[in-house]
Amino acid sequence: MCKATLITGATRGIGRELARQLQAAGFNLFITGRNPQLVASLKQELGCAGTAADLADPEAVVSLFATARQALGRIDVLVNNAGFNKGKDPLEKVTAEDLDASYAVNVRAVILLSREALKDMAPRRSGHIVNVISSIARTKMENYSVYSTMKYALHGFTGCLAKEARQVGVKVTGVYPGGVDTTFRPNARPDYMRPESAARMIVQCITAPEDVVVHELVYRPIIETNF
Ligand SMILES: NC(=O)c1ccc[n+]([C@@H]2O[C@H](COP(=O)([O-])OP(=O)(O)OC[C@H]3O[C@@H](n4cnc5c(N)ncnc54)[C@H](OP(=O)(O)O)[C@@H]3O)[C@@H](O)[C@H]2O)c1
């Protein structure tokens, strides 16, 4: 399987494990993250292409896609995995800057990369766009309003994208993991899913039979009850 694949947020957590597993499965990768040292070390480990980019900058997002496309020749699979949550804050502490920063990475960058990918994939009538959302977009939680708002927005966008993309033969998957023990939060959570496990579920969507599209993948650690 030699699919040209762009993975965002590949420098840590779920994305890093996903890159390792897709590389082992024979995918041709272009990896990205914000931290240049982490990008360089993953490129060296996997022998793949990649570059550092800050997805908060919309021009950097569009040029990232062009760079990846040029490096790989085409993009068959786009995994929009990068995302962050500043932390738990009651609404009275939420600022306009918090909202803008979260929107830029968790929503806008995904929409822009999906747009660029769809333009590339549509003429070939094949391809797959995978958006890593969160099980937070299937529930509600106090002190999580900014991150939840963005992930609900991404849930809505991904549904619209799936309808548009199917018309041109492109698959779209929304991924809704529950808690994963990554650098996403300051404290270790050994009771959450291991990033390797969370990534393995995404690999299963990407490697599903050609005649199958997984529209939504919702999964959690066994300890979570928010379903
Ligand atoms: N962990 C969980 O419990 C959980 C649950 C549900 C959904 N998710 C979602 O899963 C995805 C991956 O999360 P994770 O747990 O693997 O988090 P993580 O360990 O914190 O990794 C986040 C990745 O996103 C990248 N990133 C963040 N801001 C960026 C920016 N401005 N520009 C470019 N890259 C940026 C980081 O790059 P650098 O390190 O290079 O900055 C890093 O590679 C996220 O979308 C998250 O919302 C996580």
Image (cartoon, rainbow, N blue to C red):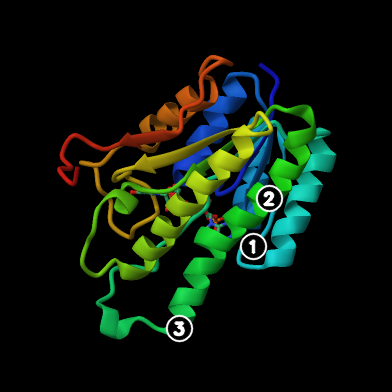
Q: Is residue 155 visible?
A: yes
Location of residue 184 by image quarter: bottom left
| Disc on the earlier residue, 1 or 3 | 1
Kind of element beneath mark 3:
helix
Q: Is residue 50 visible?
A: no
Q: Residue placed at 33% from the left, 43% from the top? A: 180
The type of residue carrying mark 2 is Arg
Residue of label 1:
54
The relative height of residue 99 versus residue 4 in the rendered view (above or below) is below
Instruction: Report the quarter where the N terminus lies.
Output: top right
Residue of label 2:
115
Q: Residues within 10 Å of mark 2 (few under 14, many from 20)?
A: some
Residue of label 3:
96
Measured from the top left, where is residue 55 in percent x and y? Answer: 62, 61
Mark 1 C-beta to ligand 1 under 8 Å: yes
Measured from the top left, where is residue 169 in percent x and y? Answer: 66, 28
